[in-house]
Image (cartoon, grey):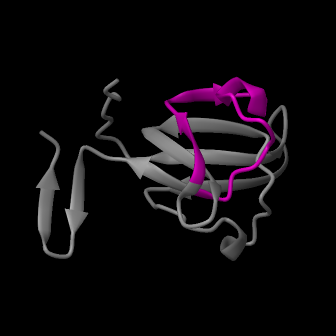
Amino acid sequence: RPFPQDSADHKIHLFENAGYTGRKMEIVDDDVPSLWAHGFQDRVASVKALNGTWVGYEYPGYRGRQHVFEKGEYRHWNEWDANQPLIQSVRRVRDQQWHQRGCFENS
C-alpha cells in the first residue's frame, strides 16, 4: 500500500524500554545504518514517530525484518508486530530516491 508523504522534517524518537522510558534517541532528517555506532543499544521497545514515515530494521545496514512506523506512538514493541524489541537501523520513507548518478522518481 502507498504510504502518505509528509513534506515536514522527518523526526522519530526511539526508546530503550516500553512506555517511552529508558534511554532515548532522537533522529531528525537522517537515515541511521547502525544505532550501535551512535551509542544506542539494539533494544528499542517503544517509538514515537513525530513526523514522516520510517522503516526500522532488525539488523545494521537496513537488513532483516522491517517494521513501518507511520506518524504516531507505539508504546510497546508488539504494536509493530515484532517478535522482540530489536531494531538496529532506521531510514526515512521519502517520495524520491536520490542516487549519485541522478534522481529516480517513483512511478
Residue at x 66% of width, y 29% of height: 80
Image mark count: 0
Residue in front for this viewpoint, 28 or 99: 99
In percent of width and height, residue 84 lies at: 81, 40
Quadrant containing the N terminus is: top left
- Magenta stretch: includes residue 84: yes
**For this view, does 92 lie left or right of residue 75?**
left
In the rendered image of this protein, does residue 34 appear above or below residue 17?
A: below
**For this view, does 70 lie left or right of residue 6?**
right
In the rendered image of this protein, does residue 27 appear above or below residue 46?
A: below
Quadrant containing the C terminus is: top left
In percent of width and height, residue 11 lies at: 51, 47
Residue at x 50% of width, y 55% of height: 28
Q: Quadrant of residue 46?
A: top right
In percent of width and height, residue 68 lies at: 52, 36
In the rendered image of this protein, does residue 72 appear above or below residue 89?
A: above
**For this view, does 37 lie left or right of residue 94?**
right
- Per the rendered image, the range of residues in magenta is 64-89
Residue at x 80% of width, y 63% of height: 41
